[in-house]
Amino acid sequence: SATGPPRSRVDVGAGARGSVRGLHRSFIMAMRAITRSSARVGGLLNAAPRRAISVASMENFKFDPIRESEVSRAMTTRYMKDMYDFADTDVIITGAGSAGLSCAYELSKYPDIKVAIIEQSVSPGGGAWLGGQLMSAMIVRKPAHIWLDELGVEYEEMDRYVVVKHAALFTSTVMAKVLAAPNIKLFNATAVEDLIIKVRARPRPRPGCERMRPARPSPCPQASFLREGPDRLFRVTSTF
């Protein structure tokens, strides 16, 4: 009520700020201890030829500056180039689930074949991130475990099947190999909404040709019709 005691409020003043600073100092001290321990074990930080980042400098760590226009240009130019390059492609795989990624992996062995993967979701992989019935383990029946050996995915071997400890291990492995292939491009967040089917049909045979057996040579004309849409003309190629 208006005449009652004032309502209590949470004070997030100096005490909270001091706690945050204390946590920050503890984190820095822990990182320094890990750094000293790693250096004593094998000199891991100094062994690699890459640019080393001192843990002590993380207190004033800053990212290199970059403008939003640079980010936009870097992304759009590469994406549009991929669209331009893969506008004419050899194979289009619809869906980047376990089946689509497995198919793409096999095609990655043929660098002359250009492959585009179309995935509607932002995150590829489909339902292969979990095993059956939303559980983590993945069961693979033999002899399909030979393919896991090729991918380098570890598993527990049973009598008639093998068990991968987590389905995401398989999915991430095959996806990494597919994305690293130079002849494959994944277009995620992209949907397939139109499909053009080329129908091959035979023309009606001339009178007298109906009774001829297919195994015997036929004097009847053989023609193939390619129909690419309801508004397009037939393209006919005849061979006599």
Image (cartoon, rainbow, N blue to C red):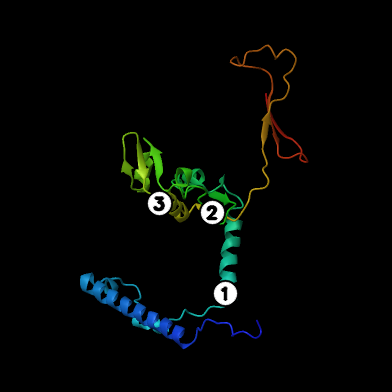
- Numbered disc in front, either 1 or 3: 3
Q: CA distance from mark 2 to mark 3?
A: 20 Å
Q: Residue at x 33, y 48 (%)?
A: 154
Residue 42, image x and y in percent?
Answer: 22, 70
Q: Residue at x 74, y 17 (%)?
A: 206
Which is more N-terminal, label 3 or label 1?
A: 1
Q: Which residue is mark 3?
A: 169
Q: Which residue is mark 1?
A: 70
Q: Nearer the viewer, residue 234 or 36?
A: 36
Question: Pointer 1: residues within 10 angstroms few (<14), some, or many (20+)?
Answer: few
Q: Nearer the viewer, residue 36 or 82?
A: 36
Left or right, 145 with reference to 83: left
The secondary element bearing badge 1 is classed as: helix
- Amino acid tagged 2: Leu
Q: CA distance from mark 1 to mark 3?
A: 35 Å
The N terminus is located in which quarter? bottom right
Compared with 240, 22 (above or below) is below
Q: Residue at x 60, y 57 (%)?
A: 83
Q: Which residue is mark 2?
A: 186
Residue 129, image x and y in percent?
Answer: 47, 50
- Amino acid tagged 3: Leu
Question: Pointer 2: residues within 10 angstroms few (<14), some, or many (20+)?
Answer: many
Q: CA distance from mark 2 to mark 1?
A: 23 Å
